[in-house]
Amino acid sequence: MPARLFRSAKADRNRFIALYVSMAVGLLVAAGLFVYEAKIIVADGLRDEEAFSVLGAANRVLHDLENAETGQRGYLLTGDESYLVPYRQGVHDLDDTILRLQQAAGSDERSLELVRRVEHAKTNKVTELARTIELARSGNRAGAIALVQTNEGKLYMDGLREDLNLLLNNWRDRRKAATQDARRRLVFGSAALVAIAVLVCCLMVYTVYVQRRAFARVHAYSNALDQQAAQDTLTGLPNRRRLLSAIDELSGHAAGSRRIALLYLDIDGFKNVNDAMDHSAGDVRLRRLAESLRAARRHAGPCRRRRLAIEGTGRASSVERACGGRKRGEYGGRFAIGVSIGIATFPDRVRSIAGLLDVADAAMYAAKRSGRSTYSFGASTATAVSNVIRMTR
């Protein structure tokens, strides 16, 4: 049993170690995965912000140029200086807007190339607007309108819009890709979190199962040790330790109206069997007597090797019936075998349950001195009644 328990405990320990290592590795891998995914999601967010900045700056460039062009045309048609206010504001803002567009594009070569082309087209367009306004101010409105009608400015704006559209489409695609990637990673991270949570729960449940099984084995082994410690190995009857424990238990629960008897048995002629037929024959005899005691237990009370406790007996005759048949001629009458029994009863003959064993022991020796194969009732005091009944061999 100890070897099996040791192997089982060692196997359970290895399982615990494997489970804890698996959970630790799983959690570390999950933590690393989430850190990696978090970094990518943050990068996606930064790309989304960059794309948003580029889109905003590009749209602002187009807006400023359209404001400047609107002011130029209004002035050419009316000659009213108030139309030059949006023109001047648009031209003034364009330099800052182009600078922000370059900064938003970052280090992307394709985007920077488009920004340079947009800046070149912007410069040409602003120059064309300034020339027409100067012509109109000098009194040559017809020349200014003729310059507009050459569609030079329209060609600059068409090229600028085309480059801006390429830039906008590029960064819209980037923004869409970053948003979709972040969404996919969030879904994947959530699914991975659920899977890891389920796995950890399963590992914990299995750990609890292994622990309970290990504790059950230890508990069963502990119970077996307790049983072995309180049981006679030869007869299977409870030993003296168990008897003393039972007496202590009875002492704690006995009521005044409850009658308890303890029988102390000793086999007469047992030594002759051992001497003549070796100890194995004596062991057989002891086991047969144990079977008789167990049979008596069903009608009386718990029995231990050489002792029988009978609880709740009402009269002495009940004890006598429990002792009936203890004398027996064995081995074809070759050996005169009998049983000497000392009986102690509480509360009539013994003052306390704790004194039952000593009184029954003394009564058993009194029965032996009276000729053996008898039983004798003992008492706590010398003046108490004691009777010896002889049984014929």
Image: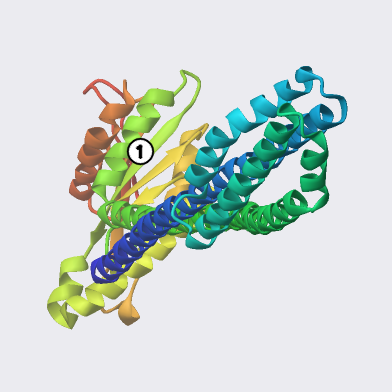
- Residue, x 44% and y 57% (percent of image)? 33
Q: Position of residue 213 (x, y in %)?
A: 44, 59
The residue located at (55%, 52%) in the rendering is: 115
Q: Is residue 156 left or right of residue 105?
A: right
Q: Answer left or right for 67 relative to 44.
A: right
Mark 1 sits on what residue? Answer: 246
Residue 237 at least partly seen? no
Residue at the location (64% across, 41% down)? 126
Task: Give the secondary structure at mark 1.
Answer: helix
Of residues 44 and 216, which is closer to you in this image? 44
Residue 286: where, in percent of width, then height? 29, 67
Picture quarter with the C terminus:
bottom left
Viewer-closest of 77 and 141: 141
Is 321 left or right of 368, judged from the image as shown?
Answer: right
Q: Is residue 179 above or below residue 274?
A: above
Total count of labels: 1
